[in-house]
Amino acid sequence: MQRERSFARTMVAASMAAALALVAGCCSLDEPTPAPKPAPVPVAKPAPPPPLPSGTCPVVGRDGGNVFTRQAIPTGTASTSIILMEKVAPEVVNVGQDFEYHIKVTNLTACELDEVVVTETIAQGLNYKSSDPNASRSGDLLTWNLGTLPGNSTRILKVRAAANGPGTFTDCARVTYKEKLCITVKAVEPKLTLDKSAPAEVLLCDIIPLKLTVTNPGSGVANNVVITDPLPAGLKTVDGQTNVTINVGNLNPGESKSYTVNTQATRTGSFENKAVAKADGGLSDDAASTTVVKQPVLTITKTADQTVYEGRPINYKVTVTNKGDAVAANTVLTDTLPSGVSFVSATDGGQAAGGMITWNLGSMAPNASKTVGITVKAVSQGTVVNRAETKAVCAAAVAATAQTVVKGIPAVLLEVIDLEDPIEVGGQETYVITVTNQGSMADTNIAITCTLEDSQSYVSSSGATQATATGQTVRFAPLASLAPKAKAEWRVVVKATKAGDVRFSVEMNTAQLQRPVNETESTNQY
């Protein structure tokens, strides 16, 4: 225990006349005998107290952590008094802890003083331990018979005691002529408690507030209070710190201070950490909290018809699953329709707007799944890629795609007509050959071959491609491509050489047909 000391002084003189008699009896007023200097006191001294005022009232003051009182007796003025008594003690002490206070008695004259007696009454609630020099004790009264006090000399009386409990204590010192000098000592007991609270369960994206409350329920000031809270791995403050230190300062009796530290987890799991509050004098307390961090984890799958023909429906299925350990709140699924399709329908209340279908799936418990369906119509050929995405509170957005190849259907129509029917032998007949692509895909490498009967002979040809005539066969060069809904035309002019019911035959082959198409036109020749 650090002991800070100052002194209360009491100076006693029976009267100014007695003082003069003492001076006359021991020394010359003209040539005063030098007094020996008092031995150094082995305690820390306070700053010099203020000068004594006139009168007999004691001077009371404080210096650092000490309280002191002093008095010159009998006049209250050092120059006209005989004895100066000084007394010093710690202003605040801890319950049950020894402390020491001093009584200093100084002979202000150059002559000896006889029968100097100092008494000290120990306050109730203080436990007297010892004194130096030893005092005779009677109950709570300590008595020092100092006997003769040489001129200009000082005696220091040291008393060791301890407070039995919180409170204030006043010890009074007296001289034999019953002048009293009193001092008050207050014993206090600071205490320290720490409370900590945090949410029991949060989501990974949530802020975790740690609330720390430190309280002094004791009767004295808790000095230099500091709270430390080392965060566990995976938990940081919102500004990236892993260790929290709060300098609270001093806490008065009954005072509390609360602090909130906002943290956030970098992973899921259970986080427990302990905070500690400390103050001077070995005061400390700790408190812990546990928070479980969870997260919803969404997955999505999407399937579609792999191949369809233009104009036919494409069917999709989308499945959303929560594979996390927390509820996925406000789960939303969206499906963006690609170009080349038109919306037909959606299951489970899907709403289509602006080329997007939206489902509000609500809250999905861990391991829950939801499957929805979409039907669209393929309006153009090519590869159609459809994308769906889902997200929820504190769950990362995930997406899935599915593709469908949209094909066209070639459907060619072959028509053959004669322009003049019947015709006379020797006359000419013109046959018109028309090919129409009625399908949804271009037809390619279209080849036309015409066959004449023996009663006709080849005259000329024209049309989409050039022809080559060999005997009774006319072959047109293949037409490279015929777009959907387009037509191509060829003409063959023949001469009637014999009368009869004649058949003009046409055969068509394309790259998309697996076998040829045949068409005939009858002509009556007479």
Image (spheres, rainbow, N blue to C red):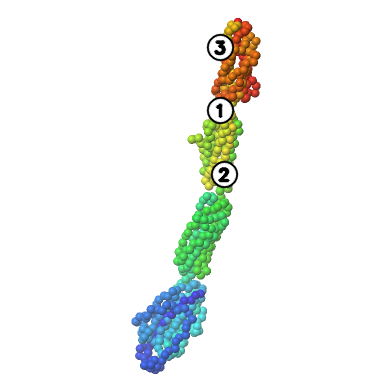
Tell me where residue 58 appears, x and y as whole percent: 38, 80
Q: Is residue 53 above or below residue 246?
A: below
User: Is residue 83 visible to us here?
Assistant: yes
Q: Amino acid at mark 1?
A: Gly
Q: Amino acid at mark 3?
A: Leu
- Camera-side residue: 475 or 440? 475
Q: Residues within 10 Å of mark 1 (few under 14, many from 20)?
A: some
Who comes first in sequence, dot 1 or dot 3?
A: 1
**334 horizontally vs 508: left or right:** left
Tell me where residue 361 appears, x and y as whole percent: 53, 40
Circle count: 3
Mark 3 or 2: in front is 3
Q: Is residue 299 above or below residue 480?
A: below
**167 horizontally vs 467: left or right:** left
Tell me where residue 392 appears, x and y as whole percent: 53, 44
- Camera-side residue: 149 or 510? 510
Who comes first in sequence, dot 3 or dot 2?
A: 2
Structural distance between the alpha carbons of marks 1 and 3: 38 Å
Cβ–Cβ below 8 Å for labels 3 and 2? no
Mark 1 or 3: in front is 3
Q: Quadrant of the C terminus?
A: top right
Structural distance between the alpha carbons of marks 1 and 2: 35 Å
Judging by the rendered image, the residue that carries numbered circle 2 is 298
- Camera-side residue: 183 or 30? 30
**105 horizontally vs 437: left or right:** left
Judging by the rendered image, the residue that carries numbered circle 1 is 311
Structural distance between the alpha carbons of marks 3 and 2: 72 Å
Residue drawn at point x = 42 percent, y = 88 percent: 152
**245 horizontally vs 501: left or right:** left
Residue drawn at point x = 59 percent, y = 7 percent: 426
Q: Is residue 110 above or below residue 172?
A: below
Judging by the rendered image, the residue that carries numbered circle 3 is 419
